[in-house]
Amino acid sequence: MAQYTPMIQQYLKIKSSHRDAFLFFRLGDFYEMFFEDATRASQLLEITLTSREGGTSERIPMCGVPHHSAANYIKQLVESGHKVAICEQVEDPKSAKGVVKREVIQIITPGTVMDQNLLKETENNFIAAVSCKDEQYSIVLNDLSTGELKGYLYKGDTSMLMSELQAMHAREAIMSSELYDHIAETLRLRYQIVSSIQDKSEVPDPFRRLVQKNEKELMKEACGRLFHYLLHTQKRALEHLQPLSMQHLNEYMKLDSFSRRNLELVETNRSKGKKGSLLWLLDRTVTGMGSRRLKQWIEQPLLVPDLIQQRLDVVEELIQEFFVREELRDKLKQVYDLERLAGKVSFGNITARDLIQLKQTLGSVPGIKQALLQLSNPYSRGLAEQMDSHEELYNYLESSLHDDPPLSLKEGGLIKDGYHKELDTYRDASVNGKAWIASLEQKERSETGIKSLKIGYNRIFGYFIEVTRSNLSLIPEGRYERKQTLANAERFVTPDLKEKERLILEAEEKMVSLEYELFLQVREHVKSYIQSLQLLAKQLSEIDVLQAFAAVSEEQRYVKPLISSTNSVSISNGRHPVVEKVMDAQEYVPNDIYLNDDRSMLLITGPNMAGKSTYMRQLALTAVMLQIGCFVPADHAELPLFDQIFTRIGAADDLVGGQSTFMVEMLETRYALSKATSQSLILLDEIGRGTSTYDGMALAQSIVEFIHDHIGAKTLFSTHYHELTVLEKQLRSLKNVYVSAVEEQGRLVFLHKVIDGQADKSFGIHVAQLAELPSAVIERAKSILEDFESDDRSQKKAQIEPDTQLSLFMEENNTEKLSKKKQEKSEVEEFLRTMNLLEMTPLDAMTTLFNLQKKVK
Ligand SMILES: Nc1ncnc2c1ncn2[C@@H]1O[C@H](COP(=O)(O)OP(=O)(O)OP(=O)(O)O)[C@@H](O)[C@H]1O
């Protein structure tokens, strides 16, 4: 260490406590990185790697970014899952003795970004902290930009924990070093979640107010971890953090990570994008806050009937009252991101422009209240009555801040005239001084008779009187003092001009620093409103989501659903909201779904592509829509409130996790079987197809029986194993339905209509034809199928299972082939035994061998 220069020593010392972050080390106008940080950053950011002397024989690798454009580079690093520690000079270099003092002022990590450039308007940015004991987990989820804190308690194992973290969209997870050793690598590789260690878990003093005294110890631990981490990275008080809100299982529908993914609630499985998801369909919100709230609602449907009913009633009235809705939408358009503005106030990075946005937002609240008061429904009226438009704060901001302030806080132009006496005096001095100077030009022109005389200003020489060379002789002796000579003019000053200049500059300097001081006071004043602004933000975002529900429901012809008190589902002409939206509405074939205690399970058969999964998803999405308080796609709908939805739909390979499709399927099923209750909804799509036919069929049947006999959950079960349809006779509450299709002139026509009973034909080859497999393959498959069907044994089998898919036939035929092969093998053996080798030519032997091999093959 000693051989390095003092500055590099300082760097190394600071770096030693920030090993997991890129250290942006401020050197003049640049942030520099050294050693390994420099080599890695130069590759990641594609910037030039240089080097500098550092006191040793070898030069030190170095790369840097200009401080004014650092934000973009930080963004790139953080978005790719890295952390950046910002190390600033914390003393004036002019007064520093030796190396200027430097300190890390903030660590920017994927889960703690506060910069607008790094945040997506319509998405929360979550950081989670975790604690665990035995099989219990506590997770606290925080969005630092909005201050929300949500707590969850779970029972499960680490793989469950990891998929929950993913389902919560956590970008970063904070945990003990012990847990870190177990899961950090998997979290990073499989879920792209950055992990950080924080072993301190006691809730620090300033944060005590956020966690209730009688909260569970494990929960307090997770909160403590989070708060210590936030203090360590942000290094400031975070007054906008909201009290911990525990998420109780009995208030929300539980949707595990598999189901959220399978139902494509907020993103599609394939592209991982919003488009094509339920969120995409419903997102008619006008504000970023509303869009984020909607996403939270979709991921946490309610279980409390009154709350759901309240939302449904508002939506109903907003559909009827078109003009009120339009007025609300209009006013909401003037609402800025109040939630994040409140966060910025506390964080200390709010600008005058942000405060103007805050003012404009407050300005639109009275209009929103007024619109809401036009509705008769008690919930929206109550909301309007509780809504505080913060008149006092509005007036305060109105009287203090300019409407169009500059971005910079240190150049003046922030505070309005009349707000502060002293500031007004300086302004007057500056304005009067400038007016005096303007009149001086006139006066000097007329007294000297020099028409081209002018008064100018530059930063170095200040104010001056400029006379062209040809007019110099007209200046009376001793009138001006010479200041600067130009090629064809001379510049002069007078004692009065100098004095005025001093007054103006002094006033301007004082003005700028006083304005900054006043701005800080304004900012401080706004801080006292953080909590009530957060409440207002919540109310506004809620209204925004409800008006969005009304807009989509009206456009898509949804109906107000009823909450069933008899635990039955009755949906007539139901539709899958997203499939319907992306296809021509006329083409969509609506379907009914009826379920009750005597008909709690439907076994769905039908050809591939007929619409089995669509039908199943349709029910789940309708349930989610009802439980978030939105109208639903049907002509009539009545559903119970489902406590949980479990799904096993589609292939969701977890290749990174090293699990096969079949294993994932079994894990998801195990999860459903162990957690479901009679109030749950279970959707199982072709369970067992990932293994051999009999194996799969046996599993499928035992799963159906288990759900029927031991759980009693409403269940939709689609299968290609037509053999299972006999279960209708054995299981009281199981009913067969099928999705119809007809064959017309050798081609398959899907009717997409779900009918009671069972399908009577297998259409696998037709689907392959639709998929435009080579015609040779199709023809061959048809002829194989014919062979199978004409085969005796196959016929016999077909009596029991007339409708099996091609795959099933293949399996069956394998058994037959096997015995055929045995027979052939014995023929070959016999031939080999009796063959007279001595009488054969080499060519004969070769031909015989060829024929034998052909036979065996
Ligand atoms: N009710 C409907 N009305 C119109 N089109 C539909 C309907 N249901 C499904 N479809 C269309 O059929 C396609 C296939 O549907 P789906 O994936 O549900 O079939 P499936 O029977 O589950 O197929 P597989 O057995 O191959 O998984 C959908 O993408 C959609 O375009």
Image (cartoon, rainbow, N blue to C red):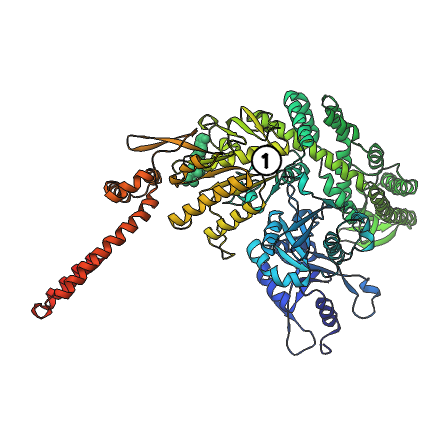
Residue in front for this viewpoint, 638 or 224 = 638
The extreme left residue here reads: 839
Q: Specify whether 596 is left or right of 60.
A: left
Q: Quadrant of residue 672?
A: top right
Quarter of the C terminus within the rendering: bottom left
Residue in front for this viewpoint, 212 or 150 = 212
- How many neighbours does mark 1 have within 10 angstroms: few (below 14), some (14-19), or many (20 or more)? many
Residue 551 visible here: yes
Q: Position of residue 418 (x, y in %)?
A: 89, 36
Q: Residue at x 67, y 62 (%)?
A: 21
Provide the residue designation for mark 1.
Answer: 624
Q: Residue at x 57, y 62 (%)?
A: 43
Q: Residue at x 77, y 53 (%)?
A: 486
- Quick check: 640 above or below 854? above
- Quick check: 204 above or below 249? below
Q: Quadrant of residue 52?
A: bottom right
Residue in front for this viewpoint, 570 or 270 = 570
Q: Position of residue 46 (x, y in %)?
A: 57, 60
Q: Position of residue 114 (x, y in %)?
A: 71, 49
- Quick check: 572 above or below 465? above
Type of amino acid at the residue the image marks with label 1: Val
Residue in front for this viewpoint, 50 or 455 = 50
